[in-house]
């Protein structure tokens, strides 16, 4: 069978349908363990509904598997799905922008892989993404190499996993959030099965143990337990996600491999790369760490988040390592980002942030003051105590947000930095900028400030340079993209209109290509 023939998904995918049975089985076993095997009628009905849902989903899954066909020709990648409602989709091979190969633990155990072929961005749904869920490992590798056209290219290792990066793993909030999701899901499960938590021995004993502690200990112990469990969860997630991490330059593409139980292989052409962003959430920033993500066509706006694993080029690591890998990915010298200095925002930008911070505190304080005046003086005391805490925190966040603001150019990249809790430094290739938008709110006009938006066909689609002086911002635009805005500004001046009175957009020549 040749590559251009029609192929079916691997028959071993039938076993994957059994995974739909795992959650209800685990839930059932857990409830039986906690209740000693005593289930009432409501619990039995709920479990029966779960079993019926499993059968329906398994039948749909089997039908999708048997009705799916795909083939790869010299010009197209085609996918046919559906038995009753048939659908035929095709992606031109010259429009393919990324090839993503993943494998869940069960896929790996069965020797299967999931191949996602993407040919666009900013498109709702999967109209420009074909997913081949269930091909053999060898076939997936041959397919990736054929589509990536890198079978004979030499590899250059850009980064590999370092043990010292593990210390950055607990410095995220997602582990704590994950603990919250699990606890909330367990509570909803008990509620759906009409089980009173007070009737479960372990929970009753835990609650009784907390009630005999002093008040400060009864509050501190659960918080510390959640934080420690969250840190452990983050560490385990880091190991599973980034195990065997390797970033390579393969010809004119970047190849990323990672994963312990669920493996992932991402291929990204350099010609699709529009820049990178370095994100520094506050806990990581305090430890001089950060994350590195690609800004590239074909990834989509959802993958612009610093927590996106699809656009991530580096796990949480030191800031110096993020700078080194960013330079390597962009094809620049190793010290490309060392000593990077950006122009500071005007003092008016600080005043705006202080105003926002105090307004946010006022929104919190106002209900307490009003209710305190109408109902009880206790709320008035709560209001002034909250004010003592919130005002310094709000002002500190405002000053930090101002210190993070900056913009400038380095080499062929325009740079913008912003954010307080999660500070971002974005480097955009100037040749990939399609348009500029200059926006001014009423308060910005009074302060002589503007927000510039560089429009690119990648990531979120537009990246902001916040609160720059209008003249300085227009000068930066002219320097970054010569000839793009002069004609528009001259035309606007000839019509006696201010070019940024209500926000304008400067479009490039029609001949410019993304």
Image (cartoon, rainbow, N blue to C red):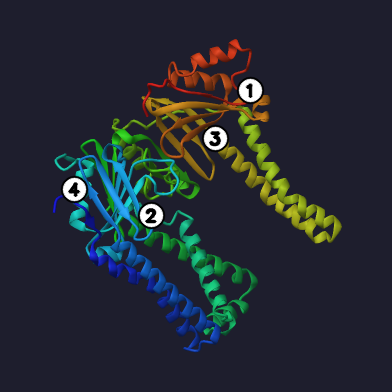
Label 3 vs label 1: CA separation?
A: 28 Å
Label 2 vs label 1: CA separation?
A: 49 Å
Query: Are the residues tagged 2 and 1 within 8 Å (C-beta)?
Result: no
Would you say 51 lies left or right of 438 here? Answer: left
Residue tagged 1: 501
* Residue 312 x %, y %: 37, 46
The crowd level at tag 4 (other Cα within 10 Å; few <14, some 14-19, many 20+) is some
In-front residue for pair 229/441: 441
Q: Is residue 199 visible?
A: yes
Label 4 vs label 3: CA separation?
A: 57 Å
Q: SS of the residue at dot 4?
A: loop
Sequence order check, earlier mark of 4 and 2: 4
- The residue shown at (45%, 43%) is 301
Residue tagged 3: 403
> Which of the 4 image quarters holds residue 255?
top left
* Residue 61 x %, y %: 35, 65
* Residue 76 x %, y %: 26, 42
């Amino acid at each position: 069978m040749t590559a251009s023939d029609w192929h079916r998904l691997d028959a071993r995918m039938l076993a994957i349908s059994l995974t739909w049975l795992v959650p209800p089985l685990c839930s059932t076993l857990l409830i039986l363990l906690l209740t000693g095997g005593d289930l009432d009628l409501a619990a039995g009905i709920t479990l029966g509904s779960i079993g019926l849902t499993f059968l329906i989903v398994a039948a749909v899954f089997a039908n999708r598997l048997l009705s799916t066909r795909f083939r790869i020709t010299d010009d197209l990648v085609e996918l046919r799905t559906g038995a009753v409602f048939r659908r035929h989709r095709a992606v031109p091979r010259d429009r393919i922008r990324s090839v993503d190969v993943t494998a869940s633990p069960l896929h790996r155990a069965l020797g299967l892989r999931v191949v996602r072929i993407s040919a666009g961005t900013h498109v709702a749904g999967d109209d420009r993404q074909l997913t081949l869920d269930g091909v053999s490992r060898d076939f997936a590798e041959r397919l990736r190499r054929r589509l990536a056209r890198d079978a004979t290219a030499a590899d250059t290792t850009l980064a590999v996993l370092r043990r010292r990066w593990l210390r950055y793993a607990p410095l995220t909030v997602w582990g704590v959030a994950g603990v919250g999701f699990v606890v909330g899901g367990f509570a909803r499960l008990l509620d759906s099965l009409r089980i009173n938590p007070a009737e479960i021995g372990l929970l009753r004993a835990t609650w009784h143990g907390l009630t005999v502690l002093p008040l400060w200990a009864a509050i501190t112990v659960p918080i510390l337990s959640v934080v420690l469990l969250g840190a452990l969860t983050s560490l385990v997630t880091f190991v599973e996600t980034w195990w065997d991490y390797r970033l390579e330059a393969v010809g004119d593409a970047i190849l990323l491999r990672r994963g312990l139980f669920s493996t992932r292989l991402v291929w990204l052409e350099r010609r699709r790369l529009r820049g990178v962003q370095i994100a520094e959430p506050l806990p990581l920033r305090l430890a001089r760490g950060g994350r590195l993500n690609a800004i590239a066509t074909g990834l989509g706006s959802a993958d612009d988040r610093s927590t996106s694993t699809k656009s991530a080029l580096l796990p949480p690591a030191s800031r110096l390592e993020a700078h080194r890998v960013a330079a390597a990915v962009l094809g620049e010298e190793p010290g490309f980002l060392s000593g990077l200095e950006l122009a500071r925002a005007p003092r008016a930008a600080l005043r705006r942030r202080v105003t926002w911070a105090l307004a946010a505190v006022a929104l919190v304080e106002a209900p307490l003051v009003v209710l305190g005046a109408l109902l009880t003086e206790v709320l008035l005391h709560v209001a002034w105590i909250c004010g003592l805490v919130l005002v310094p925190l709000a002002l500190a966040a405002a000053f930090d947000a101002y210190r993070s603001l900056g913009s400038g150019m380095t080499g062929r990249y325009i740079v913008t930095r912003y954010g307080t809790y999660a500070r971002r430094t974005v480097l955009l290739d100037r040749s990939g900028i399609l348009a500029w938008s200059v926006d001014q709110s009423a308060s910005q006009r009074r302060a002589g400030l503007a927000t510039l938006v560089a429009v690119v066909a990648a990531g979120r689609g537009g990246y902001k340079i916040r609160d720059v002086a209008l003249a300085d911002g227009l000068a930066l635009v002219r320097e970054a993209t010569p000839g793009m805005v002069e004609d528009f500004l001259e035309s606007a001046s000839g019509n006696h209109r201010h070019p940024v009175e209500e926000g304008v957009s400067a479009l490039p020549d029609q001949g410019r290509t993304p």
